[in-house]
Amino acid sequence: MTLDSTDLFGPVLDRRVVPVLVPMPAPRAYSYAVPEGMAVEPGSIVQVPLGPRFVVGVVWDGEDDGGVDPKKLRAIEEVFDCPPLSPEMRAFLDWVAAYTLTPPGLVARMALRAPAAFDPEPMVEALRLTDMRPERMTTARERVLARASDGLSWTRSGLAHAAGVSSSVIDGLASQGVFETVFMPPPPVVALPDPAFAAPRLEGPQRQAAVDLLAAVEERKFSVSLIDGITGSGKTEVYFEAIAATLRADRQVLILLPEIALTASFLERFQDRFGAKPAEWHSDLAPRTREKVWRQVTTGQVRVVAGARSALFLPFEELGLIIVDEEHDPAYKQEDRVFYNARDMAVVRGRIGNFPVVLVSATPSVESRVNGEMGRYRPIHLPTRYGDAALPDLGIVDMRRHPPERGGFLSPVLVNHIGKTIGRSQQALLFLNRRGYAPLTLCRVCGHRFQCPDCSSWLVEHRFRGQIQCHHCGYSERTPEACPECGTLDHLVACGPGVERIAEEVERHFPDARTIVLSSDLMGVKRLRLELAAIARGEADIVIGTQLVAKGHNFPNMTLVGIVDADLGLANGDPRAAERTFQLLSQVTGRAGRTGLKSLGLLQTYQPQHPVMQAIVSGDSDAFYQREIHERERAALPPFGRLASIIVSADSRGDAEGHARGLRNAAPRVDGIAILGPAEAPLALIRGRHRFRLLVHGRRNSDMQTFVRAMIAAGPKERGSISVQLDIDPQSFL
């Protein structure tokens, strides 16, 4: 392909120098020479030399400064044969980099995570029927010829399978000239979804919600809709109609899910509605599959992607709708290298691309709820369950009045209801958001507590594996028999419960019950999917799980949900603690009675009068949200104020503290912006690195990025082991 340089860069290509963004933490693009005869344009994906190696980069926007003779520059090595990143995609990557204060190369790297997909997939060898006929006809050969008589091309294995014969039959026919070899494009990674495959049967509120949502989609311009509906209200079916409308308009769709690797049930529901599954995108995909999905998304062959937060950086050819399911979920916040919230960045991508975004949750975040009340988002409310299924009855178990037996953690009230539930051949779910057997192990004799040598956290006992482990750095050792401090044998005691310990207690109470423990550290994704499918089929009586059981699963026979420790999430300094506890417990109790069976949710708590507990059991979510919104507004916390977190870490405590104080002293004086700290982070030591924290607090209209950028520029420079981590709009306060 030959391009006129004036159509692309004007004077830049006349000089044959272009800016190329490379996937490294450099503050700007590097200059590269364009070899004679090579055509590039903004967005072209190229291979360039960088030091002693070759890396993938993107030709970026803007003119090169022209200060270097092209003959002295290193040249672009190769232009990959794939569509360039669109202007909207490049603008989005620039926006994310500027907002998160991240070097743009690291952001662009997230859009280039499948380097083997940059060149086209090889053509597939296939066979096509000719006019020749075999010398001898057999029944097997007749079946092959009948199947291939449609004139289509077939792969050798595909034709053998369709005709019910062995490959040798096909090879024999091909050797006699009955088939000719042809080449055809590689097959799609998923079939095309059909918007008319299964007409939905929406009722009352669901039908009206779908009408409201379709109005937003059919405008074909940027808007944000917030579908707020109780668990089981048909939110998924409603936004499926928006997906169908987008597909009919010949646009692509992205569905973001917080735990895509675990949501096999969602993929099946999508297939039931559209006749084909969406393409998946998450870290557990095989590399070859990731490459195919990336390539077919860029060419438009894949029409719908269901993915984790990283799917937001796929370079779609013609994206027309983003759905953010469970938009409140903290899993949408990435806290590694590039710190971003996929929910918020999805809204930005919709605004830049001028298409609608739909946020979905039974328990919306306070930020989204406020945006809905202020008119920034279009609220769509679903007040009843689909099919008029009844909500579970909810009750509080006051652990002060109904304590568990000695050494146990389940109240007799909850144990009694579990027995009644499994006696009716129904299922019970026990929820505890704590992995392992016990969060702390200590010696009864000397009081020694087992702590991670590299982190300021206790080692968690995992009795099923015979280990004690740190959940922050992964350090583990075999569970000792003697105290390493005093040497006493058989005097180590596990303190507190994890899901494994609850399973042990359940086994004592109900030895004949079929019990499954669901925890991300006990099994891989494939095993988890199998276990979830088994539960849905009724092949377990009692399920004990961590927060992954709250992720939108549908268990038809689940009629009892017991929250083992409802107070757990309230015991920290996170300003979102009450909100997150309310969301998590509401989602978990919503697993009960989804098919209309009478159901019950019980919350074990030592704080029965806490506003979170009262809001959940009363079903008055509006009162809870109004209280939380009032508290946030009074304290000027998000969304009524802005926060930025700065974590300084180093190999020595003194270096970390000194650098943090230097940054504090270098901060500009700006009206309406205050700095808290430095102080040791709650997790003061992680992986052997000491951590100090600065928290920047400003008004809602504060220019937080400019303030932080100026502070970093004027402050001490990073040296030695010192590292500075910036997080705009932090979600974690550890």
Image (cartoon, grey):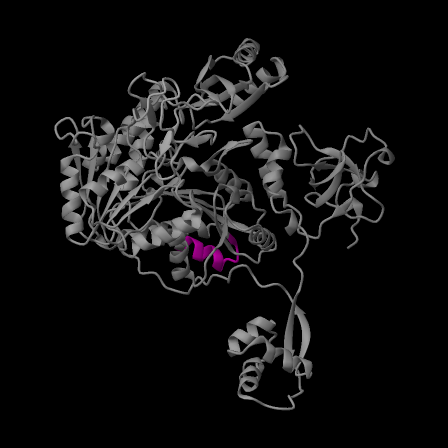
- Quadrant of the drawing holding the N terminus: bottom right
Q: Position of residue 678 (x, y in %)?
A: 48, 12
Q: Nearer the viewer, residue 21 or 217?
A: 21
Quadrant hosting residue 179 = bottom right
Q: Position of residue 222 (x, y in %)?
A: 49, 43
Q: In the displayed structure, would residue 24 be above or below residue 39?
A: above
Q: Nearer the viewer, residue 81 or 42?
A: 81
Is residue 245 rendered magenta in the image? yes
Q: Position of residue 91 (x, y in %)?
A: 61, 38
User: Which residues fall within the magenta stretch?
Assistant: 241-252
Is residue 520 rendered magenta in the image? no
- Quadrant of the drawing holding the C terminus: top left
Q: Is residue 523 visible?
A: yes
Q: Position of residue 552 (x, y in %)?
A: 34, 46
Q: Residue at x 79, y 45 (%)?
A: 5
Left or right of 680, for residue 384: left
